[in-house]
Amino acid sequence: MNIEPGDGYTVEEAAGKIVQIVTLGSSRHFPFEDPETRRKAAGKILSVPDRTDSGRIELAYPLDLGGVQEGLSYIMTLLSYPAEYNYTDSYLVEKVSLPTKLRKNLPGPNYGNDGLRAVLGVEGRPVLGLLTKPRLGVDLSVLCENCREALIGGADFVVDDELIIDPATSLQFENRIEEMVRVRDEAAAEAGEQKAYFANISADVDAAIEYAVLAEEAGVDGVVMNAFAMGFPALRKLVESEAFDLPIITTNVGVGILTRFGDPRNPAGTTGISEQVIAKLSRYAGADGVHIGIAEGEWYEVEASSRRAVPLDAQIGSIAPSTPVVAGGLSVENVWRNIKILGSDMIMEAGRGILGYPAGGPREGAEALRVLLERLSSEMTQQEAEQIIAETADDLPHIKKAFDHYGAEMG
């Protein structure tokens, strides 16, 4: 954690109060407690900074504080509980590490990165997804035609917008998934390559399972949900459900209410949980893909996205890696910088960058992004990338028009 102690406390004193309140339930001993037993039962302060006014601390809590069955709900409570007290003026949870005893009840993703890529039929480059837009005001027939054009142009899959679930419009769930599966199949036949569709099932967990079953029966390839809003236990219940077998991507939409804590380079004076922790817990809970924002685009705190991706592919026992999902203002103007920062092993989802492509329609927008994803690599230098983009613009002149529209240099 990175903390700023409350009035009257040093960093070390505040750390001691946190350890005691979390592990013992009180920062003061009770008359019936043996002092030595209390000391041994409490957690430990592993490190504190030399300075007394703020800094990063590392704490350890005893394994017998909770049982393995309590899962991620209990972990979230442990992490967030100290924020209720005046021992700190700021309390930022930056990292979390779970021991093997706790991880053994968290098997992680069913599909993981490799399985998700197999479902999407893409290897060796970022996967290109289309986020359906807008949420209201457009008939399903228009939405489907735009998706069909984008898939033919080069998008690998279509995914429902994060807030489109089962509206009282032509986009109603059963109606929408039936039409989207039809569009997927038609586009795959015309493009001569595999295409996919992921449906949004974000709802209370019982309803989400019902939606997932309907989706699988209709031939949908995967589902998206919101583990932040629904809870990590809800994600685990979906992952472990025997009612359906589909890969799951979590959007974690709304998590900024916890993670939007100001300048990440100067965390003093902030309280919250880093998106790195949220991403890691999403992987523990079983998400095959996890939204991490974007390295450059319209997302808040874009420079932190590379750090969020770290816990998704790091070695954690036998838990399979999750796929980072990048979204939030992706376009031809910033696709290279996102690849350079985040690498190529990810899913990149665009909405306006395809549907509102300034040099053509959805087919051209998807084509532009797809070709760039195929030709660019994170191992390239800036000069090499600029050359590739310039050569691509010669092959596809509408890319040059798009860069002119954005007022950006190519690369």
Image (cartoon, rainbow, N blue to C red):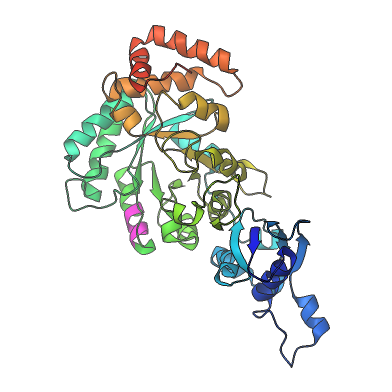
Q: Nearer the viewer, residue 257 or 43?
A: 257
Q: Could you say where residue 383 lies in the image, as x and y percent from the top left?
A: 57, 13
Query: Seen in the image, is 355 located left or right of residue 369?
Result: left
Q: Is residue 371 above or below residue 11?
A: above
Residue at the limit of the structure toward the bottom, as seen here: 32
Query: Seen in the image, is 231 located left or right of residue 206?
Result: right
Q: Could you say where residue 268 lies in the image, as x and y percent from the top left?
A: 61, 54
Q: Nearer the viewer, residue 338 or 143?
A: 338
**Snapshot quadrant of residue 153:** top left
Q: Is residue 353 above or below residue 46?
A: above
Q: Residue at x 22, y 52 (%)?
A: 167
Query: Magenta stretch?
Result: 207-212
Q: Nearer the viewer, residue 159 or 116?
A: 159
**Snapshot quadrant of residue 357:** top left
Q: Residue at x 56, y 33 (%)?
A: 342
Can you see residue 62?
no
Q: Nearer the viewer, residue 293 or 84?
A: 84
**Snapshot quadrant of residue 187:** top left
Q: Could you say where residue 322 lies in the image, as x and y percent from the top left?
A: 55, 43
Residue at the limit of the structure toward the front, as seen here: 8
Query: Seen in the image, is 201 located left or right of residue 56?
Result: left
Residue 315 covered by magenta stretch: no
Residue at the limit of the structure toward the right, as seen here: 36
Q: Is residue 354 above or below residue 204?
A: above
Can you see residue 223?
yes
Q: Main secondary structure of the magenta part?
A: helix
Quadrant of the frame with the N terminus:
bottom right
Query: Seen in the image, is 359 located left or right of residue 391?
Result: left
Q: Is residue 56 above or below residue 401?
A: below
Q: Residue at x 28, y 28 (%)?
A: 356
Q: Residue at x 33, y 61 (%)?
A: 207
Q: Could you say where residue 177 lies in the image, as x and y percent from the top left?
A: 27, 44
